[in-house]
Amino acid sequence: MAVNFENLITDLVKPLVVHPEDLIVKKFSEDEESLTLQVIVHKDDLGRVIGKGGKIANAIRTIAYAAASRIGKKINIDIDSF
């Protein structure tokens, strides 16, 4: 079963942001063992996605890690704004 991590992260982050039209999730790099995704949000939404003390970002990463471990991959998620 192939997991589309871009859609997974988009579905997790979109309800959190005020500017969903500015949400971009793209695959930065991928090999057989790891995957790097970059999440770009509007600068006003960065705090909403990271959360106080990084709790929301850690929760998003935990869900993605669980999905990736089921197919034997490691995932890295970078959150940034423009």
Image (cartoon, grey):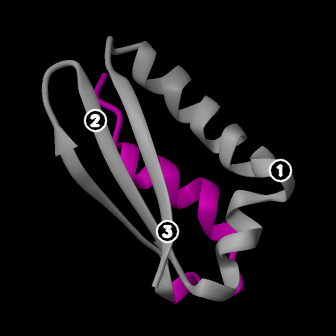
Find disc 1 in the rendering and name its residue.
53
Q: Is residue 8 above or below residue 49?
A: above
In the picture provided, is 24 more to the left or to the right than 28? right
Dot 2 or dot 1, earlier in sequence: 2
In the picture provided, is 77 more to the left or to the right than 13? left
Q: Are marks 2 and 3 in contact (CB under 8 Å)?
A: no
Find disc 3 in the rendering and name its residue.
80
The CA span between labels 3 and 1 is 16 Å
Find disc 2 in the rendering and name its residue.
35
Q: Residue at x 39, y 31 (%)?
A: 75
In the picture provided, is 36 more to the left or to the right than 33? right
Foreground: disc 2 or disc 3: 3
* Residue 81 position in % (x across, y down): 51, 77
Q: Is residue 5 above or below residue 66?
A: below
> Is residue 76 a member of the stretch shown in magenta?
no
Amino acid type assigned to the residue bearing label 3 in the image: Asp
Q: Residue at x 79, y 45 (%)?
A: 55
> Is residue 15 a member of the stretch shown in magenta?
yes
Quarter of the rendering containing residue 13: bottom right
Dot 3 or dot 1, earlier in sequence: 1
In the picture provided, is 7 more to the left or to the right than 26? right
Dot 2 or dot 3, earlier in sequence: 2
